[in-house]
Image (cartoon, helix red, strand yellow):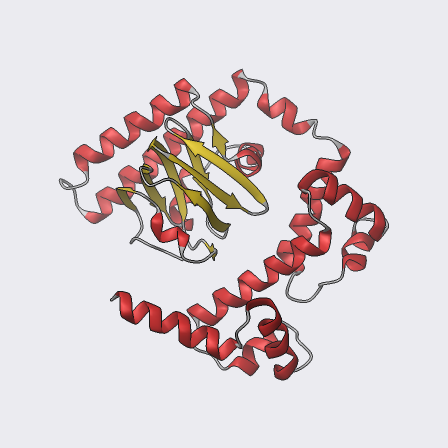
Amino acid sequence: MAFFASPYFQQTSLHEWLNEPFISDEGYLLLCLEGKVSIEVGQTVFHLSAGDVFIVFPADFVSMQHVTEDFTCRVLNYDDDLLRAASLNKESTVFDLLRNHRIYLQEKALTQVVVLIFQLLDHVKELVSPQAWRNIVQLQLASFFSAFHDHATRQHLLDLHNKESRQEELVRRFMQLVESSYSTEREVAWYASQLCITPEYLNRVVRNQTHRTAKELIAPFLLMHVKHRLLTLEEPINQISSEFHFSSPSFFSRWFREKTGLTPNQFRKSAFSKIKIKK
């Protein structure tokens, strides 16, 4: 769900994110200015307040859990192409660490870097051509990643990340499998077999780390992608059912209705009608 044309830079309350959980089409670099907000990304809830830096990557699951009336933040959004260009020559472990932790609570050096980046963008956004703007945003994203790499190195975060526990590693590998196989594999036993452990042990580890069962992590992932497909493409329901490997369109409709209270067609019509009203 892209709220702004990329790359875009603005001050916002993020109240747009309250409407419906979504799969992010773009990435967002946030600097919280005042108020508080709770955002769920993947299966983790993050609590943000003034001075916090937070990052969302393209294709993340995002759900706004709570936001105070006075919450405001600065947001820079970026697309996949900008992310790839800005992250050249950066260690993959840096991005693994960012994906795992996301939030940096009032880290003065990192926050100051983001403040300076945003001040620069404020000064130049109306003065340059669209292509120059993209180039400047790319350089500023690269600056943020370099600053984070320096912060992670000085705080020995990369060493700690590389020494993750066996349980943390299992949950990370499980979620990677879910991300790549959710459309065809929905049984905990299949994921357990891929990890060479029993379903019971997988459930126990996942619950220890996330307070949810493995099944409770698989189902929302699939549902979110189905909703995203219904909202972004006008292909027939039976084609979507087939692409997500449901046994039949009728079973797909029953499954979707059990999860949402609406049939796929009802969900699509309701969502599109809300979009027209907002316009």
Q: Is residue 194 left or right of residue 55?
A: right
Residue 64 in the image, given as x and y percentages of width and height? 45, 48
| Between 259 and 53, the one nearer to me in the picture | 259
Q: Position of residue 150 (x, y in %)?
A: 47, 21
Which of the 4 image quarters holds residue 69? top left
* Residue at figure coordinates x 53%, y 77% from the top left: 263
Horizontally, residue 279 falls left or right of residue 56, namely: left
Residue at the image position 49 percent from the left and 82 percent from the top? 236
Q: Say left or right for 231 vs 11.
A: right
Residue at horizontal 79 percent and vertical 44 percent from the top: 204
Q: Which of the 4 image quarters holds residue 164?
A: top right
Extreme-front residue of the structure: 69
Question: Residue 30 sits in which quadrant?
Answer: top left
Residue 243 horizontal/vertical position (percent): 59, 74
Q: Where is residue 221 in the image (x, y as percent from the top left)?
A: 60, 57
Residue at screen point 51% across, 66% down:
227
Quadrant where the N terminus sits is bottom left
